[in-house]
Image: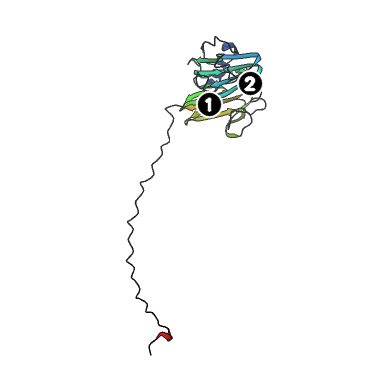
Amino acid sequence: MRVYLLIAALLGTLGVSHAANFNVTWAAFAGGYAPMNISCNDVVTFAWSGPLHELEQIDKYSCDAKTIQHTEEKTTNATVSVVFPYPGNYYFRCDVGSHCSAGKQIIHIQVADDCPVKNGIAWTQVFRARAQWPTLNVPCGTTLTAAWNGTFNHDLHQVEKDDCTSNVVKVWQEDTNIASVPISFSKAGTYHFRCDIPTHCPVNKQRLQVIASGSSCPTTTTRNPPPRRNPPPRRNPPPRRNPPPHHRMLRAEEQQP
């Protein structure tokens, strides 16, 4: 009963009618973008046409920041919707030419800690308006729960990379029409998940990347090797005794009669 209540709460609060939608015209211009403050499960849609742009998620608000997800590759025309199911700070930029540094094409989105179901992920494209997830940054020790009901069948596979073709490393849930799957992140690292039902990943963007980090992550201690013992002192060999002198043998013709 508890599982069904969790699924109902997750999916009921992630319907399209329950989430706000924000539109961002993704372009390079001198004014830049003001920080956005949105609620958990809100959807932000980035759109552009004409000039070449891309949409990268980065790890901090800087044009020199590390890319953690290629949300949309370079193209001249795109509409990209991103749904934010987890509180925190998210950063995106365009890395084409000087679009970020000169054109201020970088944005900070802050998601409030007001999720109706804490650490819940509605693992279905229908209830998130076919928007894709950003990379989630969670502290070690976090448990995320992916849930779906009987609208469509899904599975939940952990894979090697953030794509739709890499090898499966763990099956969290096989193909089924209803499930609630808790996943705990006890170690630091980057984790990748996807649904392998046909078209769900490549068409509906049903894949998720999670980065676990922070001071709560267990640390690996390296033991120092034991001190090296000095070898025992080397004993000098006894002095070598000289052999007795050889007597010179006189040849027969040199011997005295």
At 50% from the left and 15% from the top, the residue drawn is 110
Q: Measuring from the top left, give residue 180's x and y in whole percent.
A: 55, 25
Please, is residue 196 above or below residue 87 in the view? below
At 42% from the left and 83% from the top, the residue drawn is 251
Q: Nearer the viewer, residue 247 or 215?
A: 247
Give the number of marks: 2
At 57% from the left and 12% from the top, the residue drawn is 18
Q: Measuring from the top left, give residue 247's x and y in whole percent.
A: 37, 79
Residue 222 quadrant: top left
Identify the residue position indicated by label 2 in the image. 74
Q: How was this image coloured?
A: rainbow
Amino acid bearing label 2 = Lys
Identify the residue position indicated by label 1 in the image. 210
Question: Which SS class for mark 2?
Answer: strand
Please, is residue 68 above or below residue 39 in the view? below
* Residue 184 can be seen in this image: yes
| Sequence-wise first label, 2 or 1 | 2
Select label 2 or label 1 by which is in front: 2
Please, is residue 226 above or below residue 163 in the view? below
Q: Measuring from the top left, give residue 172's x and y in whole percent.
A: 56, 31
Amino acid bearing label 1 = Val
Q: Measuring from the top left, give residue 49's x and y in whole percent.
A: 66, 13
